[in-house]
Structures are given as structure tokens and as C-alpha cells.
Amino acid sequence: MKLTSEILERHPQAWVLVGLLIISTGIYLGFDHTAVFVYLGIGIVSILFGLALFVFQILDGPKRSKIRPLSRDFISIGATVIMPTPKADQEPTPSQ
């Protein structure tokens, strides 16, 4: 499905966004709160995970095959139309 592929293409960006939101929540709490370092750690891990997914997407991108040139004698099956030719001593029959 196309919807699934679009969601999976944006997956790394979602992880980076979640990481930034977690970091901003930790900074909003302030450094005198003890859980701020947990927020910062989880946010940084989330951002790094999003970046790793992005790199893996680039490395696993669409594979392109080698361009193989066609020979001069290549004839496409779809373009080939074989029509019977009337023989010289026969009258052509009208098609029904």
C-alpha cells in the first residue's frame, strides 16, 4: 500500500521529533529537577535512533540494475503483428 510506504519513509523524522520534544520537556523542567538527565538521555537516544534509521534508509535505497543495451535484432513481442498474406493464386477472403 502506498500509505504504509509513506509512513515508513517519515519514520526517522518522527523519532527525531519525539527526541526533540523529550529534550525540550526536560529543559522545561529545569536542571534542579532530578529527572532532567533521564529526559535528556532518552531524547538523545531517540534522536540517534532516528538518524540511524535515516542512514539505513539511504543505504538500503532503491537498487538500480545495470542498463543492458538491446541488440540491434531485438523485436518487441507486443509490437510484432503477424498477418497472413494472401497467396498469389488465392482471392483474399473478406473478414467477418
Image (tube, helix red, strand yellow):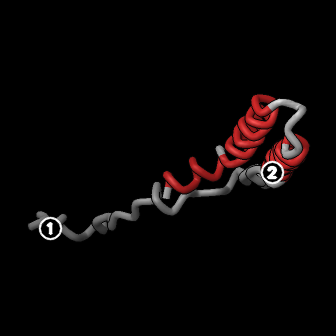
Q: Which mark is residue 53?
A: 2
Q: Is residue 19 left or right of residue 3?
A: right
User: Looking at the rendering, which quadrant does residue 60 occupy?
Assistant: bottom right
Nearer to us: label 1 or label 2: 2
Give percent across and percent down for residue 32: 89, 33
Q: Is residue 4 left or right of residue 14?
A: left
User: Which quarter of the image is occupied by the C terminus?
Assistant: bottom left
Q: Residue at x 84, y 49 (%)?
A: 42
Against 28, residue 44 (above or below) is: below
Residue 96 visible in the current orientation: yes
Q: Nearer the viewer, residue 87 or 6?
A: 6
Q: Residues within 10 Å of mark 1 (few under 14, many from 20)?
A: few
Question: In what element is the residue under mark 2?
Answer: helix
* Residue identified by numbered label 1: 93
Give percent across and percent down for residue 95: 13, 65
Give percent across and percent down for residue 64: 77, 51
Q: Residues within 10 Å of mark 2 (few under 14, many from 20)?
A: some
Residue 51 visible in the current orientation: no
Q: Nearer the viewer, residue 33 or 55?
A: 33
Q: Residue at x 88, y 44 (%)?
A: 34
Q: Nearer the viewer, residue 71 or 26?
A: 26
Amino acid type assigned to the residue bearing label 1 in the image: Thr
Q: Residue at x 65, y 44 (%)?
A: 10
Q: Nearer the viewer, residue 31 or 62?
A: 31
